[in-house]
Amino acid sequence: MKAILLQWMLNISSTTLGGRFFVALLSPIDRWLLLKTNGVVSIAGLGTPTLLLTTSGRKTGQPRATPLMYLSDEHDPTRLYVIGSSGGRPEMPAWVLNLMADPKVLVTRDGEIQNYQASALSGAQHSAIWQRFIRFNPGFTHYEGRLNRSIPIIELAPRANQALRFTAAARFG
């Protein structure tokens, strides 16, 4: 049943309307759930590995949290990859612009909050990881076909071995 639900969600989110729906409606709900549960409960997490990425706003310096699907590195599971598809929207996601200004981010997942360093992939590494995302969800090719921009792939590498000892909700006062 979980696999059927996941496939249905992936198929819907690959459409223009579905991508907008997931970004506009489900992302705020997922953000709330992930904050309240320290990254344990997520709507998207019904079959999609989901994390909460917290960046510093490039204009305000305020924390900005975004739920994102991720894939772990095949050789180092602490190294994570996320994509800036924004549900197939033409604009670059704000979280990507934020981490370009300050690549130090927090990642909340599986009950822990950890410091990570973000960097954009390019060349062969970008292509290889993009193929992994397409294998996970072939619908990502629909996003790519609708956009006049490239979809960034961001590598998240741990900056510290220890998880921070506070809740995700505490970051936002």
Image (cartoon, rainbow, N blue to C red):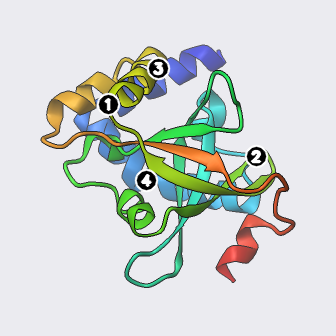
Is residue 124 left or right of 80 when viewed as pictured?
left
- Measuring 19% from the left and 49% from the top, which residue is drawn there? 90
> Which badge, 3 or 4, is on the more N-terminal residue?
4
Dot 2 amino acid type: Val
Q: Is residue 152 visible?
A: yes
The Cα–Cα distance between marks 2 and 4, rounded to whole angstroms, is 20 Å
Q: Nearer the viewer, mark 3 or mark 4?
A: 3
Quadrant in which the N terminus appears: top right
Q: Is residue 1 above or below residue 142?
A: above
Q: Which mark is residue 102?
A: none
Is residue 53 left or right of 27 when viewed as pictured?
right
Pointer 3: what residue?
132
Q: Is residue 44 above or below residue 161?
A: above
Q: Quadrant of residue 35?
A: bottom right
Of 35 and 21, which appears nearest the observer? Answer: 35
The Cα–Cα distance between marks 2 and 3, rounded to whole angstroms, is 24 Å
